Amino acid sequence: HFEKLSCTACHTGPWPKKEAQLVQTALAHGLGNHGTIKADSVMPYIQSPVFVKGHDGKIEPHHLMYPSFWGMKEGDVVTPLPLKKIKPIVETVIHADTLTDSLNMLIVRSGQWPNFTDDKLVAALGALADLDSSAAPVYVSGGYVYSIRDSLVRKEKSAAAAPYSWAFAHDVRPAAQSLGAGKKCADCHSLGSALVAGKMTVPTMLASAKGESRSQLYFQKESRAFAWLFAFTFYFRPLLKIVILISVLFMAGVLLLYAFRGLEALVKSN
């Protein structure tokens, strides 16, 4: 375990659930500042704990956040656009529909994403195209880079859309509340454990992309089939222990029987 897991994997942060929780950090959410909305649903959407394989190859708990921004793509390089440049353009597209304008304004002011359809994405990217004729406007969100080709929305994976994650070490749980203290091995190695069956929802403003999720195993860089098969073997471990115990008792009985026979033969020879 010490070769594959950091100490924090079992002893740090909230008890892992089947779905990573939305959390707030003091820096990202401006906690402590006057007038700050403290609801979990407020942007930026930071999820935790997500078990990630670190640079040292050990699995450790991380806070994780997917980037969302407007940018320009030239070749394989995506460059974010300054907020003051894109804000008036994108806000005009978002609030173009007067029927949903009041609702969207209320959602945005509450710190959440507005309703954003593919049609609005096409309109926004079309408006941003006038900013730079040498690069293609893109929207980065939910792990993908969205662009327009032949008037259709295209999405592709890119390093620019990869999630950001960072390790944390608090709050520390005592040994009695660590992974392995409750259901022993089953805390991590059962088919329903957070490390095997856990997932996190990928946040995005785009309505058509909502609902996508990632497995905890995805960030651990582990094979889903192997993890499930390995977890499945733990259901038979109690039975295996019983079989081993019976086998040991049987072998001990055989050895004891032949020991007595040997002693009997020794006594008769004398």
Image (tube, helix red, strand yellow):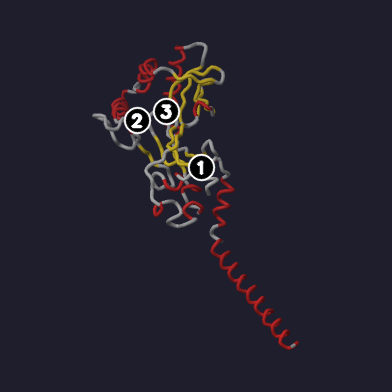
The residue closer to the viewer here, 270 or 76, is: 270
Q: Residue at x 45, y 17 (%)?
A: 126
* Neighbourhood count class around disc 3 (C-alpha, 10 Å): few under 14, some 14–19, many 20 upward: some
Disc 2 designates what residue? 27
Disc 2 + disc 3, Cβ < 8 Å: no
Image depth: mark 3 or mark 1 in front: 1
| Residue type at the position of mark 3 | Thr
- Mark 3 or mark 1: name the one nearer the start of the chain: 1
The residue closer to the viewer here, 117 or 252, is: 252
From the top left corner, tell me how far across and down residue 237 is, in percent. 55, 61
* Residue ranking furthest to the front: 270
| Residue type at the position of mark 1 | Ile
Q: 2 left or right of 262? A: left
**Residue 269 occupies which quadrant of the picture?**
bottom right
User: Could you say whether the residue bearing mark 3 is in a helix, strand or loop?
Assistant: loop
The residue closer to the viewer here, 262 or 161, is: 262
Disc 1 designates what residue? 59
User: Could you say whether the residue bearing mark 2 is in a helix, strand or loop?
Assistant: helix
Disc 3 designates what residue? 117
Q: CA distance from mark 3 to mark 1?
A: 37 Å
Q: Residue at x 47, y 51 (%)?
A: 193
Residue 6 in the image: above or below residue 189: above
- Mark 2 or mark 3: name the one nearer the start of the chain: 2
| Residue type at the position of mark 2 | Leu
